Amino acid sequence: MKEGDETLLIVSLYVDDLLVTGENNIVLTDFKGKMNSMFEMSNLGEMSYFLGMEVFQTQQGIFLSQKAFALKILNRFSMQNCKTTSTPIAIREKLTSQGDFEKVNESTYRSLLGCFLYLIATRPDIMFTVSLLSRFMHYCNVNHFKAAKRVLRYIKGTISFWMMFTKVESMKLLGFADSD
């Protein structure tokens, strides 16, 4: 809901989870009252967990994490006790569908990449590697699976990472490109 240039109300809906936010408490209270009169609802107060994301709000900003989901992924793929690595992909890693490498179970590989794709919502640090690994969904071999396991080892070592959003008065967009 907008009034002029000001956004009054933001409503996020996913199946039966509803998240309502806005700057105007009167508009928020009115909306929640109307929704509550039409539907059975619970007001859980300030957001602390939504769609598998842990949310921590402070004066410094809003922090998001998917630590619980990351732990589930590690357990699901029997990597909960693995050694950690400091990067999600090896330097100069060259993955290809060419060559005579042993194939792996495509279903398992796709399932792992699906987990990674959900995890990148709070972990942009693995986005490039997951994008690269996704190119081999239909022809995955032991090298691809080994690279995916490296991402799991990286996640294990960075399990306590949070994504932070801070409020700023003005924003200056900066960009960087590495043509390598």
Image (cartoon, grey):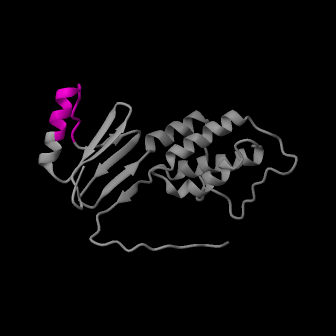
Give the percent coordinates (x, y) of residue 56: 31, 49
Residue found farthest to the front: 4
- Please tell me whether residue 14 belongs to the stretch shown in magenta: no
Examine the image and state in which quarter residue 31 appears. Answer: top left
Q: Residue at x 64, y 50 (%)?
A: 150
Relative depth, front residue between 4 and 80: 4
Relative depth, front residue between 32 and 65: 32
Using the rendered image of the protein, determine whether residue 55 is visible from the camera's viewpoint: yes
Q: Residue at x 35, y 59 (%)?
A: 165
Residue found farthest to the left: 26
Q: Is residue 63 above or below residue 91?
A: above
Examine the image and state in which quarter residue 85 appears. Answer: bottom right
Question: Is 29 displayed left or right of 100 in the figure?
Answer: left
Give the percent coordinates (x, y) of residue 120: 51, 50
Q: Residue at x 54, y 49 (%)?
A: 155
Q: Bounds of the magenta span? A: 31-45
Give the percent coordinates (x, y) of residue 152: 59, 46
Q: Is residue 40 above or below residue 79?
A: above
Question: Is 131 displayed left or right of 176 in the figure?
Answer: right
Give the percent coordinates (x, y) of residue 69: 47, 40
Residue found farthest to the right: 100
Question: Is 75 displayed left or right of 136 in the figure?
Answer: left
Q: Residue at x 48, y 49 (%)?
A: 159
- Please tell me whether residue 38 belongs to the stretch shown in magenta: yes
Relative depth, front residue between 101 and 2: 2
Instruction: Tell me the quarter of the image containing the C terminus.
Output: bottom right
Relative depth, front residue between 42 and 101: 42
Using the rendered image of the protein, determine whether residue 81 is visible from the camera's viewpoint: no
Question: Is 137 displayed left or right of 40 in the figure?
Answer: right
